[in-house]
Amino acid sequence: MANLENIRIVLVGPLYGGNVGSICRAMANMGLSELVLVAPSENLNLAEARMMAVAAGDIFEKRRVVATLEEAVGDCGLVMGTTVRPGLYRQHVKTPRDWAPAILASAAVNPVALVYGRENSGLTNEELAICTNLIQIPSSPDYASLNLAQAVMVCIYELYVASGTFELPVEKSSECLTATREQMFKMWREMLLDIGFMNDEKSDHMMLGIRRILSRAPLTTDDVNILMGIARQMTWKSRQKDNLQ
Amino acid sequence: MANLENIRIVLVGPLYGGNVGSICRAMANMGLSELVLVAPSENLNLAEARMMAVAAGDIFEKRRVVATLEEAVGDCGLVMGTTVRPGLYRQHVKTPRDWAPAILASAAVNPVALVYGRENSGLTNEELAICTNLIQIPSSPDYASLNLAQAVMVCIYELYVASGTFELPVEKSSECLTATREQMFKMWREMLLDIGFMNDEKSDHMMLGIRRILSRAPLTTDDVNILMGIARQMTWKSRQKDNLQ
């Protein structure tokens, strides 16, 4: 989707290759592809990055490396900073879910940057000042600080969901029609009488229980065919035994 | 929050300590604490797990290790399996966001298990059959498979958000009252006339532009005080210069 492709992940001073690689994979999972590293650590473990990127190695190989945040976001409209600490510049924060529609709308016009700070110290006040808006990820006050790759994942997952591109797999078998379902209950009633599970007097009450169990979630036509097959076979077996006696 | 504490993360056959540690941290971030490993790899790197858990090492140390999935979930009501592949047993899948309310409601009564498969092969059909429901995380069809720790994070982040426990920090300064804002615009008008930025004839039109710029987002009382201070100082400076000439 075009809007997602126009969203850039900017990592300021990343220390660990594993995180950078995990972020590449997360980006591929959520339809993003543009990664910029600002002054990454000289000790960034490239082998670890490639290992954690798994099948998203192309995003890592195409990464851009620049010296300053200004260079990384000069051509962007919205520049979204992430922070876990309240304080100066940090009053107008919203959650990733709240920001998602505005980010996608802006990405239809200009590149949008999502900016993440160093693993150990986040973004400086100077870097936060360059950001046009701030994101705070909901997390427990007892341990608010997310791993860098996890923080990126939560934000871009929200963008992917908000983009509306994802659809759950379609049911192979649609919800069963009432007439078929009632036919199935009729067969079960006969079968349960036949095998002596209930007598005629108790049957209405018992069938309410059976209906309750089998109606708690929607039944597909496939489901009902299986249930009718059981009733049919059980009835046949039960009568066969009676005939043998 | 009690409901979150009743949600158990069950990892079946995990291979990598780094993932297990990252999951401990994610759990602490999202208010969970109970981790069960089913037949973990004998080569699971414990040091790596402790390193990636960072401040959530207590969750890792308190982990329970069992031999089978049945043991891990025997006392649970809902057992949610995660899968990326459609197929047998996989028709009734929903997203983590769709499932979240039902999971939280069930966790108020019985423990709920979220079950995740091996990094390389997921859950077997036998393991999926034990699950009462299935979760599929929205992801790009081009690279649908998330890292294990990322998959856990997305699910429990959705639960944390749905639990309603998180609140954004309150604005220190509330939205400015209209009377104060209008006073500020009056001061800016006088100042912009004073310094010769505009003349009287153009001033109404120009002030509409200024209003548009300053009204695009809500202004707090603090913001308006800063803007009034600028106008006041500029007017003073401008008149001082005029007096010196």
Image: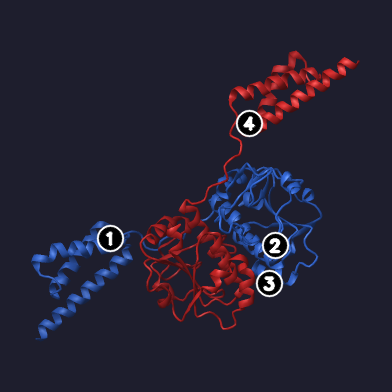
Chain colours: A red, B blue
Q: Name the residue: 75% across, 58% down.
A: B13
Q: Residue at x 63, y 31 (%)?
A: A221
Question: Which labelled disc corresponds to residue A116?
Answer: none
Are both tags, 4 and 2, on one chain? no
Q: Of discs 3 and 4, which sits in the foreground?
A: 4
User: Do badges 1 and 2 share one subunit?
Assistant: yes
- Disc 4: which residue: A221
Q: Are marks 2 and 3 in contact (CB under 8 Å)?
A: no
Check disc 3 and report its element: helix, strand or loop.
helix
Mark 4 burial class by Cα count in 10 Å: few <14, some 14-19, many 20+: some
Q: Chain of mark 1?
A: B
Mark 4: amino acid: Thr
Q: Which residue is mark 2?
A: B59
Residue drawn at (41%, 60%), measured in percent from left and top?
A103
Mark 2 surroundings within 10 Å by alpha-carbon count, few (fewer than 14), some (14 through 19), many (20 or more): many
Distance of label 1 from label 4 (alpha carbons): 57 Å
Q: CA–CA distance between discs 1 and 2? A: 48 Å
Rendered view: A63 above or below B139: below
Tell me how far mark 3 sits from mark 4, CA to CA: 51 Å
Which of the two labelled residues, at mark 1 and mark 2, occupies the earlier sequence position? 2
Q: Earlier in the sequence, mark 3 or mark 1?
A: 3
Q: Which residue is mark 1?
A: B215
Q: Quadrant of residue B39?
A: bottom right
Residue B139, quarter of the rendered image: bottom right
Residue placed under numbered mark 3 in the picture: B51
Against A40, residue A114 (above or below) is above
Residue B167 in sight: no
Query: Tag 3: residue type?
Result: Met
Sequence-wise, the earlier of marks 2 and 3 is 3
